[in-house]
Structures are given as C-alpha cells and as structure tokens.
Image (cartoon, rainbow, N blue to C red):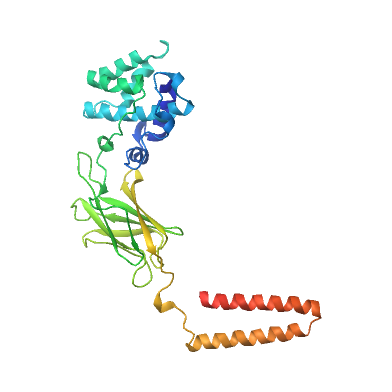
Amino acid sequence: MAWFTEGSATYYGSSFEPDGGQLRWKPATILRKTDPDTKWPRGDHHEDSTLGDADTYDHRTSYEKGSRLLFALDVKLREATDGEATIHDVMYRVNQRSGQGSLNYTEFRGIVVDLGGEDLGTWLDPYVLTSQNPPQPNASVFGPTPSFAEGTTNTSGDARETYEFTITIPSGDQARLDSVTVSIESRWSTVTAVVADENNDGRVRVQFQPYGPDGGTVLQPTDAADELTLTEGGLEEPVASEVLQIKLQVTDTTGSYTLATRSITLESIPTTTPQSEPSPTQDGDSFAALGIDRLQNHLYTYASKLPLFNAVLGVLLCSAIVGLMIKGRYVE
C-alpha cells in the first residue's frame, strides 16, 4: 500500500477543495481526467507497474497511477451505492485505523467491500495486484455535465465562414445548469461570453464567425430566446489565427470550469477588409505621398551640406526615416 499515501494526497489535492467544512470536488480536474482526448493514465512508465509491488514502479507512479485508481474507485463506489458512499468514506475509515500499524491491501480491500460490496473488491484486485490499468471512468456520477451536441466536431475552414456550436445542458437530480461560457481563444486575443438558456430547452446554440462582414467577430445565439452576454474582450476586431480554440465552460454557483475544447484550423486568414485597403488614387493618399516627397527632398538637401563622412551617415539615416514613414502610412 505504499502507493496509497501519495496517490490519495494527489487525488485530494487536485480534485477536491474545502468549502464551509465540507470537501467539494473540482470539476475542472474531474472532467479533464474523463476527457476522451486525455491519455489514461498518463505516461508509458505506468504500463508495466503493479501498485501492490513497489519494486515495479518509480516515484511518479504513486502520484499518477495511484491517484487515478482512487478516482476510478471513487466513481465505482458512487455508482454501486447510488452516491451514498464515496472515497471520503474510505479515507475516514483508513484514518480511524491510526495507531494500528501499517495498512495492508487485505485491510484496505475489506474497507472497500464493506462500503460497496464484494463485486467492488473483485473489481479492485487486478488494478492493485497486477499491472492492469482501470478503465477511464465516466464523471456523470458527480452530477450532470453539459456536452457538445452530436455532430459538433473539430473542423477547418475559412475565417469568413460561420461556425455553429450546440451545447446540451442535461437535467438531473441536481439543479439544471442554465448557462455556459463560450471562450474563443486565438493567438493574440480572447473573447468570452456567457450564453443563457432562457427558454429552458436544455441547450444553447452559438453562431460564430471569426471574420464577419464588417471586419469584426460575430458571436451570437442562434436561438432568439437565448441570451449572450460578453464578459471579456471585444467583437470590433476580427479574431483570426491559424488555430482557434473553442472552449466551453459551465457557469455554476461554484465558478466556471473548462468542459471541453474544439479547434478550428483556418485555411485562410484575411488581414484586412477590402474597404480598408489603401488606394493610391485617393486624394488623401496623393497628398500624403506628396508630403513625404517634400520631406525627403529637404532631408537630402540638408545632408548634402554636411562633410562627406557625416553626409553618408545622414543619407542612410534619412532613407531609414522616410522608409519607416511610408511603411507606417500604409500600415494605417
């Protein structure tokens, strides 16, 4: 049971937090552990390690494989007892043994069986006594969690295209979560908005266009009954990058946490709208170009009156100044 000390500390430290004398689970960690894109468990060095045999693993195995076994055990306990027993009950009984000597696996298994039944002990055996890894559990036992609707997948396209993301908000014994946070992350900026399910149909649909018709980003609910409130960033400028991360977060009374991500790989990235491209035929541009020419003539006239060495440096300096002014003009 050497793995249990660090495994339990890691599980509690990363997955739970004290709140008013009670331990509440941290949804961010739980959901990340059950994300289908997350390796379970992380690290190839776990494959041949047996938790019940300390000689088969390194120092990281207790932290990583050990904590993930306790997470899986927590889920199985909640499933077997309809939420009546959790990993907290296991820890309580382990702590009650204080002063009775080192905990061995037979005693630990007895605690688990007493709480969840013999089937749970049979389930636990291969994950402690052999190198098998427990299957990645489902976090639904911790309460209903929103998800991307079927068909909402990673995609790619043009920055001017419109993308739609549907997020289902399931109901359950717990109070319905009535809003989600949509976070659009590009290389340079982040736009975040809360979308509320105002008509209580159990879903919100968000329409997103990285580079809208007016040059800015379009972010709005598809269902007119739902409401979108911008909480971070602005939509005046386009959100355009080679890869856009779409992060959906649940908003509840304990705070927001990352639910899932989707990526948009843009095949083309417009840098300016056609209306804003500089035209050399406009009077303003012609006037500006004329002003630059006059300044250039004055600078070269001044440089010509300097000694040879200073003149050479002066010409180079003048050229650099003029070049920066021209570049700045057309960047604007």
Look at the picture and state if 178 lies above or below 120.
below
From the viewer's side, name the closer residue of 53 and 276: 53
Q: Is residue 95 above or below residue 185?
A: above
Question: Foreground: 181 or 58?
Answer: 58
Q: Choose top left, top right, bottom left or bottom right for residue 110.
A: top left
In percent of width and height, residue 89 lies at: 31, 23
Residue most extreme to the right: 307
* Residue 130 picture location, percent across and down: 35, 21
Name of the residue lying farthest toward the top? 100
Tell me the quarter of the image containing the N terminus. Answer: top left
**Quadrant in which residue 295 is drawn:** bottom right
Q: Above or below — where is 264 with respect to 306? A: above
Q: Position of residue 35 (x, y in %)?
A: 33, 41
Res 209 → quadrant: bottom left
Name the residue: 35% across, 32% down.
23
Residue 132 % position (x, y): 34, 26
94 relative position to 115: left or right: right
Q: In this view, does 262 lie above or below 27?
A: below
How many numbered marks appear? 0
Residue 83 relative to residue 302: left or right: left
Q: Residue at x 44, y 19 (%)?
A: 54
